[in-house]
Amino acid sequence: MRTAITGATGYVGQAVVHKLLRRDHEVRALVRNPLTAGALRDLGVELVEGNLGDRSALRRLVEGADAVIHLVGIIVETGGHGFEQVHVEGTEAVLAAARQAGSPLLLHMSALGAREGADATRYHRTKWRAEEAVRAGGVPHVIFRPSLIAGLGSPPLKLMLDMIRLSPVVPVIGDGRYRLQPIWLGDVAEAVARALERADLRGSFDLAGAEALTYHQILDQLEAALGVHRRRMSVPVGVARFAAAAGANLPSAAPITSEQLQMLLEGSTTEDNAIATRFGITPRAFAEVAREICAPYAARRAAAS
């Protein structure tokens, strides 16, 4: 299958590309700078130089493709890359190119919790609007709405690991009982491949791991994988909100934004998890994923002791 993909150099995109190549898909990727995407070229990926605002590049990307995978998204707004521009306008541009090319399938990566309404973050509202555009776009589609994607290179888990490794005290915002349902990166990539290969998998799907874990339970499993135990300090939610708001003017100095804080506190779980019921994938346990993520640090710790 000839597959076109945006976001191929990202955390999820790299895993998806490797999965598709192992299943003998031909992959064409949109990249900002081919000179810095040599690793993809070395794998046999065809590179198309451009970005989501380059309609000509998008046309070249999707031309003749049997499926288009749109993975580009941001968690933090920086400079000219805002939620509206990336999530909504970027998705509309990819959709328009796919529709014009007569693409048989568009697979779009959204997020668990995407919704409209005043109670939603701008991240979730723009993710929802992108979903709505895809649903109304006239192209057969698959929409994935994953919980926290856990694997080597996960920014949120790397932050948690660094706190555990480098500090004798780990801060926990509020009571730490808000729950997440981490899904292994490899399971997400497998779901993408199965969606491309099975015509019965069309529509919108929540993707999550087997367990809904509290923040404390996630810390417990990371500590166990590292072989350490840290004291935890509760940070009042009000204090965390003040710090996040104050850090808006100094984003590089703020460990979490106001929107990220809201999303953390509301959690990310689903009762409509499609990973096993629709995709036939037995999700990997987070404890096993934690051991994989922590293995390099645990090995260093063992060697130093």
Image (cartoon, rainbow, N blue to C red):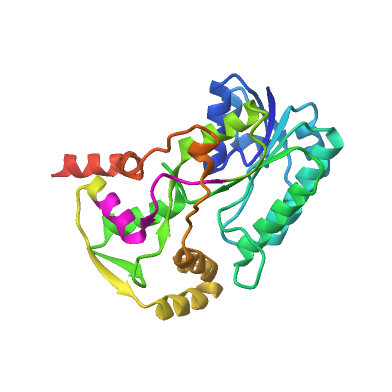
Q: Position of residue 37 (x, y in %)?
A: 60, 35
Q: Is residue 32 magenta?
A: no
Q: Position of residue 13 (x, y in %)?
A: 57, 38
Q: Residue at x 60, y 67 (%)?
A: 121
In the rendered view, does 37 fall on the left or right side of 151? Answer: right
The relative height of residue 283 versus residue 1 in the rendered view (above or below) is below
Q: Residue at x 66, y 35 (%)?
A: 34
Q: Residue at x 30, y 41 (%)?
A: 291
Q: Residue furthest top?
A: 24
Q: Residue furthest left?
A: 305
Asked whether residue 167 is in view, the answer is yes
Q: Nearer the viewer, residue 77 or 231?
A: 231
In the rendered view, does 226 fall on the left or right side of 264? Answer: left
The relative height of residue 11 versus residue 76 in the rendered view (above or below) is above
The relative height of residue 288 versus residue 39 in the rendered view (above or below) is below
Q: Position of residue 193 (x, y in %)?
A: 58, 30
* Number of marks in picture: 0
In the rendered view, does 60 fall on the left or right side of 190? Answer: right
Quadrant of the drawing holding the N terminus: top right
Q: Residue furthest right?
A: 100
Q: Which residues are magenta?
A: 206-223
Q: Position of residue 206 (x, y in %)?
A: 56, 47
Q: Is residue 210 magenta?
A: yes
Quadrant of the drawing holding the C terminus: top left
Asked whether residue 78 is in view, the answer is no
